[in-house]
Amino acid sequence: MTSRPEFAARTAGMRPSKLRELVAAAARPSAGDVSGPTLLSLGGGLPPAEAFPARAVAEAAERALAGAAGAALQYSATEGDPDLLDLVGADLAGRLRLPDPTGRLLVTTGSQQALDLIGKVLLDPGDVAVVESPAYVGALRALAGYQPRIVEVPVDDDGMDTELLAGRLRAGLRPKLCYLVPNFSNPSGRTLTARRRTRLAQLAARYGFLIVEDDPYGQLRFAGADLPPVAADAAEQVVYLGSFSKLVAPGLRVGYLAAPRWLHRALTVAKQATDLNSAALSQRLLVELLADPDWFAGHLAGLRDLYRVRAEALTGAVADRLAGRLATPMPDGGMFVWASVQTPGIDALALARAAMRRAVSVVPGNEFSLADGYPRHLRLSFSMLGPAGLVAAVDRLGDAFDDLTASG
Ligand code: PMP
């Protein structure tokens, strides 16, 4: 006889994450040592330790605690620290030409919390949620908790296929929301074209759904020109999500959203029930850091250089050493390439397992689809290793291919 209550029905949709194992493994990397059997990670999409501005954060903490310790250590407003809201609002209005975001902003505990709050206030069981496919696994999991019917719309070289979505809408599909990462998506590395951005906003207005524009990587562009966000044309139809995780440090757990006015209050009330407010100390650290725009601009320029060099090293090594076996398009920014297996008969999951035996981690494509639509793809992250480590990791992937072909 069991003496415990049943779990809620919604937990049925909460699948454990294979990524978590990979992230745990990636927590013990050795970017410098490429000779031994230490695991080389192309798996988790984490910023490397050398990307963290640790000294600037320490100095910011000193100032935050000396100046306004009361605010830094106290509960803060649910909407967020007023100084941080001012800085974020000015950035969005300037850089992204978003219509005045005052009164539409909410600081969140990472953008992961924004995804959860959006699901919480919009999705009843059975409601339709469209996601680009392949999709960020954290978004799939956050939404799945609210038991929607998740409909995957494929991504091609130009990002999510908006004409395919238009066809589904004409045929009667009525989503409440459509989730996508328009810039250098996780995992596809693809960027939504300007035409498709406009088209998606038109579809949202016509069919009455919310676009969830998740943009943690937009400021990590290292090639090509910035595109206006979907939200620039359609503020009442889009919730725009930003995050400091990839720009400063994920350990701060600070992100933000700019919501349509009709949605802002519901999200704020939902956040009150969830965590009252995001960490006040982290927000004051960011206020101190962003108060020096030259420092921040220089820091971002350094990150873009770091990731460009790494993206070139990874795609170059694959082209040199795995031609005909693996194809990796070069992304314009972010941390990921979406690699397709070219060798007939080799399955991505088998390859990922063989790679793990050769001490290199990669994520099999099916992690990013509820429909297991990507048995021949891998997500490779170039964020964690320096160029020499990336080349060594690609060599080990070559060994993994050899192991699979040798074993038939
Ligand atoms: N969205 C995307 C596309 C991501 O890749 C991530 C983190 N990997 C997140 C959201 C969540 O980031 P955070 O909660 O740290 O802001």
Image: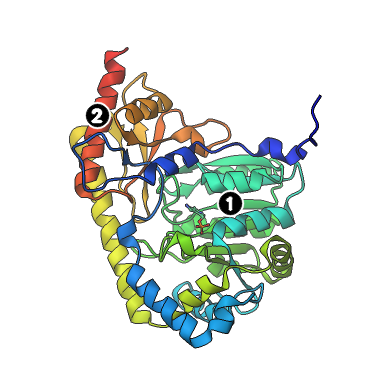
Q: CA distance from mark 2 to mark 1?
A: 35 Å
Where is residue 86, by image quadrant?
Answer: bottom right
Is residue 8 visible to us here? yes
Q: Position of residue 60 (x, y in %)?
A: 41, 78
Q: Residue at x 65, y 78 (%)?
A: 103
Residue nearer the viewer, 212 or 25:
25
Q: Position of residue 274 (x, y in %)?
A: 69, 60
Say whether mark 2 is within 8 Å of ligand 1: no
Where is residue 277, by image quadrant?
Answer: bottom right
Q: Seen in the image, is 251 located left or right of residue 11?
A: left
Q: Residue at x 30, y 47 (%)?
A: 330
Q: Are marks 2 and 1 in contact (CB under 8 Å)?
A: no
Residue 41: image tag: none
- Where's the N terminus, which quadrant? top right
Q: Seen in the image, is 307 located left or right of residue 261?
A: left
Q: Amino acid at mark 2?
A: Gly
Q: Which residue is mark 2?
A: 398
Q: Which residue is mark 1?
A: 179
Q: Residues within 10 Å of mark 1 (few under 14, many from 20)?
A: many
Q: Residue at x 34, y 75 (%)?
A: 297
Mark 2 or mark 1: which is in front? Answer: 2
Q: Amino acid at mark 1?
A: Tyr
Residue nearer the viewer, 67 or 330:
67
Which secondary structure, mark 1? strand
Q: Residue at x 50, y 55 (%)?
A: 196
Q: Examine the rendered structure and indicate whether residue 127 appears above or below residue 201.
A: above
Is residue 289 visible to us here? no
- Where's the C terminus, which quadrant? top left
Which secondary structure, mark 2? helix
Q: Position of residue 151 (x, y in %)?
A: 63, 40
